[in-house]
Amino acid sequence: MTGLVAVTIAVSGCADFSAQDQQKAAGPFSSNNPNPPPPTQTPPPSPQPQQPPTGPCIDPDPSVIATCLESTGGIAPGDESGQSAVIAERTTGKIIAQQKYGPHRELGSVPVDASGDGGLIDFAFSPTYSQDRLIYAFITTPSDNRIVRLAPGDVAKPILVGIPKGATGNMGSMYFRSPNELVVATGNAGSPASASNPSSLAGKILLVTSLSSGANPPPKILASGFGSSVALCPNPATGALYAADQTATEDRLQAIEDSGPKVLWTWTDKPKIAGCAAAAGSIYVSTTRTQRIEAVNEPTRERPTITAPVVVLERRYGALGRMAALPNGLIQFATVNKENGRPVPTDDRVAVIQGGAGADNRT
């Protein structure tokens, strides 16, 4: 997702977008002491580090910022610090916001069919969210995959329907490229032939510009031929767009160019790439089977060659799902241990790492 939405986080029911609790203002800095004590005076004791609270959903890992989630779908940063996140609970249809050590805050929910790998797949905040409180959600129903719009106190309104649904291959991704352009990546619904069929919405990257409910015109197809679990990772700083997916023979990372998808790297061991994020000169992918985050250098005009991926995190949090990048280079990622791993008591979780220690760091 591009940009960073200042998400209002408040205790709520279904599709409640009430105002965020006010943060406590930091106190003023103390001034320097112009008359320091003599050297013989006993120095005051050093302040003790603040201890985290205790409880069944408090994870001792300092990098973990959200806990006790149901199986996750898409995620988005909740603020600029990286210490809060908004998460799609794929199996419940709830959009959950959580600050580190804070309670779950439900921003909205929608009925979903969570069989297979369907459910609440992804979401995107309206570019004018602070005024309209609209959230767009990519969901699975009993008959199809679709994009719906959630508004406070209202039922979900369909925006784009008829995206093929399969027993597998439903996971996709979306983000707002501009205020009136929603880019949507769809899985192949278990049918590679559908991904190359121009009359099917499966296995495609689509441009949706009609965002009102009702009978909307078909979206524009930007690219075709994608497999399952398609994840988009735009780089707002450069305007580049990358996509990661899984095919029957390999997992791939591709650059989405005007001429079509360009393969940057493939993984023939099929680690089950689930997430993708671009930050700090690298493109990161997260994997479910091998439980890694790997990084490759982001290609530039001066340095177009892609070097071999570097493992920056391995088997620390279990099976990994979607990712999101912040402008300051932080990377958030969610676990999917309840569906694909061995969950610990605080799963599923969201953790954060600093980007940049990746493809160019081989020390």
Image (cartoon, rainbow, N blue to C red):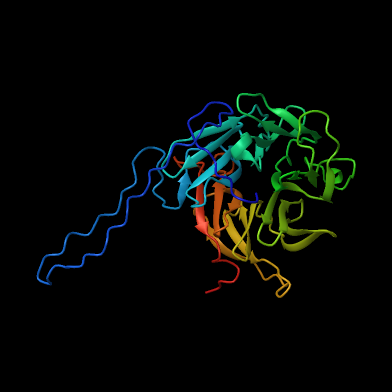
Q: Is residue 233 left or right of residue 201?
A: left
Q: Residue 80 location in percent, x, y?
A: 52, 51
Q: Nearer the viewer, residue 94 or 202?
A: 94
- Taking the spot 62% from the left edge, 66% from the top edge, the residue there is 281
Q: Nearer the viewer, residue 309 or 243?
A: 243
Q: Residue 101 location in percent, x, y?
A: 41, 42
- Taking the spot 56% from the left edge, 28% from the top edge, the residue there is 16
- Residue 285 visible somewhere in the drawing: yes
Q: Residue furthest left?
A: 40
Could you say which quadrant of the image residue 305 lies in?
A: bottom right
310 over 142 or under it: above or below? below
4 over 306 or under it: above or below? above
Q: Residue 152 location in percent, x, y?
A: 61, 28
- Residue 317 visible somewhere in the drawing: no
Q: Nearer the viewer, residue 109 or 339?
A: 109
Q: Residue 14 location in percent, x, y?
A: 57, 26
Could you say which quadrant of the image residue 47 lies in?
A: bottom left
183 over 354 or under it: above or below? above
